[in-house]
Image: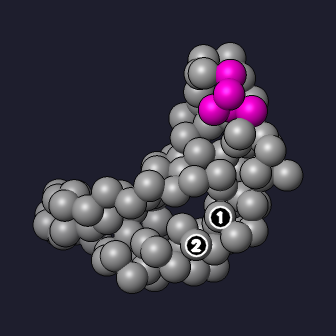
Amino acid sequence: MTDYGIVFMLAPNREEAEKIAESLVSQKLAACVNLLPGIRSIYWWKENVCREDEIMMVAKIRKQDFDSLEKAVRELHSYEVPEIILLSIDAGAAPFLDWIEQVTR
């Protein structure tokens, strides 16, 4: 187990995803945020099955920064209930994990 994690988030469009990603990186809450277009989400919301195209954001973070990252995302996000999920990195290449540590301080 390491002190690092991956955070999965979704945004309704590229503009909002870039705004969130740039904010997280500039605040040093994430070392990197990848934007993955072409996500099709089918989900239950307010008594309806919804279908939306979304952008997935994948952030590399120090786990200790998760609460601050979540707060920052909620402030910028247009969704009432944004997806913000932290998964632990159990193992990783030492130079990559060191880089996360260095750029998120």
- Tell me, yes or no, whether the two marked residues, 1 and 2, touch with CB atoms within 8 Å: yes
At label 1, the amino acid type is: Val
Q: Is residue 98 left or right of residue 37?
A: right
**What segment carries the magenta color?**
94-98
**Which numbered dot is residue 71?**
none
Q: Inspect this view and state whether residue 104 appears.
A: yes
Residue 59 location (% of width, % of height): 54, 51
Q: Inspect this view and state whether residue 63 appears.
A: no
Q: Nearer the viewer, residue 70 or 21?
A: 21
Q: Is residue 37 left or right of residue 26?
A: left
- Residue at the spot of label 2: 22
Residue 50 location (% of width, % of height): 17, 67
Looking at the image, the residue that sits furthest to the front is 95
Q: Secondary structure at mark 1?
A: helix
Q: To which quarter of the image does residue 68 belong?
A: bottom right
Residue 6 location (% of width, % of height): 55, 41
**Is 87 colored magenta in this rendering?**
no
- Residue at the spot of label 1: 25
- Within-10-Å neighbours for mark 1: few <14, some 14–19, many 20+: some
Q: To which quarter of the image does residue 11 belong?
A: bottom left
Q: Quadrant of the N terminus?
A: top right
Q: Nearer the viewer, residue 66 or 20?
A: 20
Residue drawn at x 64%, y 66% as measured from the top left: 24
